[in-house]
Image (tube, rainbow, N blue to C red):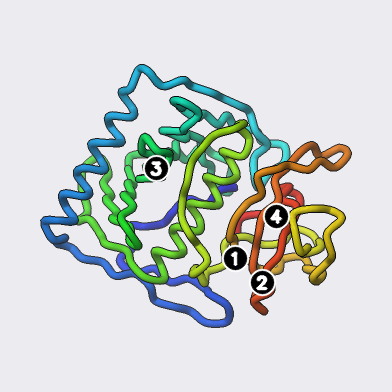
Amino acid sequence: MMRTKELIAGIIFFIAGNFISVAVFAQSNLPDTLLRVLEKGKAEMKSIDGDPSLQKLSLQLPYMSFATKKITVSVYVKNNIPRKLLFNSYDESMILGGREMYYFDSLGKVIGYIHLMSGATIRDVYIGHAVIVDTKDKKNADPPQLIQYAMADYFFANAKYEIDYYLSNFKDLKYSTFDVTDNSGYTVKVEKATELRSSPNFNASVIRKLLKNAPLLYIDRSLQQDSVAGKGKWIWIKVRDKNKNEGWIWGHPSIIQPY
């Protein structure tokens, strides 16, 4: 499944290679300039929600972690540019956890994220090489946090993986997300042994064999999809392993899962 972001805690730890890095820089009182960025992002996302000119496209897709579970993914587009991507999220018990939404500007650049959980809202606004995180529940609102450096890279990599996976199922959409080559936190893992290839092609040379549960860093996706009998068409994803080998893996969820 696509993992729910746990952002309410003040300090977040994540495993990157063989070390643990503290990478959250929280500010309880953001500078006025960043507060204005946050408010502008919130206003733009609200405007997208209320735009009646957007065309809604929906598909039912296999659920990432549980092959028998399917969810509906919707994208709201204009001139082949996505303005909003919406999908449901679940916890490990498969109880509906809420709705997750990514928002894009009129050029297709991702600008923000909202997760509506039971009684709580998490909102991210992306700015440069940082994330402004705004959280609240039905009774309380936490001060906005500024997430920078390594943790921001990790946020971007997770967001790019989700966006790339879901939007790859809709044809000819034009969008852009993040450069995640600096991310050092594992994003995906190998569900079963597979080959890391030099290009997104089953005929490409094999760089190495990846064993089950091998952790990987997500970098990018292919534009084309290739099919395997009984599993349908799927994108290829570009990854980096712990030895800094980069290559391509066919991205079917029986092979690759979120870390």
Residue contact between numbered discs 3 and 1, judged by CB atoms under 8 Å = no
User: What's the distance in space between the residues labelled 3 and 1, CA to CA?
Assistant: 23 Å
- Mark 2 burial class by Cα count in 10 Å: few <14, some 14-19, many 20+: some
Point 27% across, 36% down: residue: 44
- Residue bearing mark 3: 115
Q: Quadrant of residue 7?
A: bottom left
Mark 2, secondary structure of its residue = loop
- Residue bearing mark 4: 256
Can you give x and y, in whole percent of width and height, for residue 191 in the image? Answer: 74, 58
Mark 4, secondary structure of its residue = strand
- Mark 3 burial class by Cα count in 10 Å: few <14, some 14-19, many 20+: many
Q: Quadrant of residue 112?
A: top left
Amino acid residing under circle 4: Ile
Nearer to the camera, 51 or 187: 51
Amino acid residing under circle 1: Leu
Residue contact between numbered discs 2 and 1, judged by CB atoms under 8 Å = yes
Amino acid residing under circle 2: Asp
Which numbered disc covers residue 217?
1
User: What's the distance in space between the residues labelled 2 and 1, CA to CA?
Assistant: 6 Å
User: What's the distance in space between the residues labelled 1 and 4, CA to CA?
Assistant: 11 Å
Q: Earlier in the sequence, mark 1 or mark 4?
A: 1
Can you give x and y, in whole percent of width and height, for residue 104 in the image? Answer: 39, 39
